Amino acid sequence: MSGFFKNAFLIAKKDLYSELRTRQVLGTMIIFSGLVILVFSFAFDPAQNTTKAVIPGVIWVIIVFSGILGLNRSFISEQRNDTMQALLISPMDPSSIYFGKLLANFTMILIVELVSVPFLFLLFDFHSIGSVGYFLLVLFLGSFGFISIGTFLAALAANSKSSEMLLPLLLFPVTSPILIGAVQATKIILSNIEKLPDAVAWMQLIGAYDVIFFVLCLILVEYVMEV
Amino acid sequence: MIVARKLTKQADDKFILRGIDLEINKGETVAILGPNGAGKSTLLKVLATLIKPTSGLVSIKGLEMKKSQHEIRKLLGYLPHSSFLYDHFTPLENLVFYGAAYGMDHIEEKAVSLISSVGLSFFLNEPVKNFSRGMVQRVAIARAIIHDPEVLLLDEPHTGLDQGAADTLNSVILTMKEKGTTTLMVTHDFKQAAEICERAVVIKNGKLIANFCLNGKDVNFLHSKYTELVEGGAS
């Protein structure tokens, strides 16, 4: 078991270091999220109270679309010089490779959230979060579920010639329960904290979905990564 | 050390390997020869656990591939056509990463010594993307042996190497041989095969058509034998 985590951390460290070197993905993700925020801030008047209602949606639009940018690169980057094959013939378990990739993608989306969410609140003049703790929890749960399924599907799609088109097609239907739950929970936490039990119920749904799909992905990833 | 029995590999409707029987002893250096599309690289990929055979049995060091894939992978060093290197990493970073993937200790020292043994000590911290084809191949060789494998699978390792680099590769293979490493080398370079291999097997149309000793034989012998077997219509 320690070998599993050791190898996963090795892969995550390699991917993040690689990103630090190339700055290909994270920069694009942050620029994309900045553009989304900018466009929405012009489209909706921040002075109006109704504008607050779009904030949960904007947050998850940023996470989903910038997340896809990162997920697409995650396994495609291993096709250059067939480095994926090198990982597969090493004594590393495919599930630890998957978990390592997941950790790297999750770290990158957390960085994007860390930059974009305060920027969004700033441009929309929003400063009345119902509960910061629950808000962070829903961001964590939703992002983890989206990235864990996304990483698995990115591994699956990487073998296809049109993987960049295939990934969103596969990802959106499978992650829609997470996204619906996350938007609903975020909406309640940001603007209607009295209904917190409803938000908790949505978060429980997301949590259950996360656990089931994470375990499924760990089990099935071996078959997906076969050459 | 390596045993393959009735090995077949089918892709779509085509049989790439048609019942290969092969036995290689510990410490042997064996050349795999054959025309393009004969199935040489596929055989190496099967032995490297990269692709699963359609039928047949493979065992390495007494471990059956189907049951002990994880243990077998620790024994193997594989050098295919691709370098398996991360372009934006330096040779040192590449080797340290792969050493860690194989659970090695003191990786950095080992990596530095290997890079210097392939003649790239001045390029230790230069990204691989700036290297020529020959330099990349040298780093790829170092990568394949970073974990001191007991079995070395080389797919046309001399491709793109200048004479000096080819000599370096040969000396690496011979040093590994002294340590007891078994080497299987797919090659079209008869001179190198005659120089470093003790045995040669010839594959044609997915079948092993010849298996002969090379000890004391020169490149002319190998060339005429190959021509007779492959171009003489043996199948």
Image: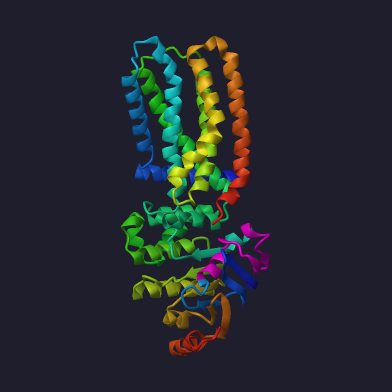
Tell me if residue B68 comes above or below residue A105 in the rendering. Answer: below
Identify which residue is drawn at 37% across, 62% down: B136
- In the image, residue B65 lies in the stretch drawn in magenta: yes
Identify which residue is drawn at 42% across, 19% down: A55
On the image, the x and y values in percent for residue A190 come to 48, 15
- Residue closest to the eye, A178 or B152: A178
Residue B93 visible: yes
- Residue closest to the eye, B164 or A214: A214
Question: Where is residue B171, by image quadrant?
Answer: bottom left
Question: Where is residue B234, by image quadrant?
Answer: bottom right
Tell me if residue B210 comes above or below residue B131 in the rendering. Answer: below
Identify which residue is drawn at 51% across, 87% down: B233
Display coloring: rainbow
- In the image, residue A112 lies in the stretch drawn in magenta: no
Tell me if residue B166 comes above or below residue B133 in the rendering. Answer: below
**Quadrant including the C terminus of chain B:** bottom right
Identify which residue is drawn at 58% across, 60% down: B73
The residue positioned farthest toward the front in the image shown:
B13
Tell me if residue B17 comes above or below residue A33 in the rendering. Answer: below
Q: In the displayed structure, does residue A60 sit left or right of residue B161?
A: right
On the image, the x and y values in percent for residue A45 come to 33, 15
Residue A104 visible: no
For the image, the number of numbered tags is 0
**Quadrant including the N terminus of chain B:** bottom right
On the image, the x and y values in percent for residue B158 come to 41, 72
On the image, the x and y values in percent for residue A114 come to 42, 27
Write the start and end of the magenta stretch as one range: B41-70
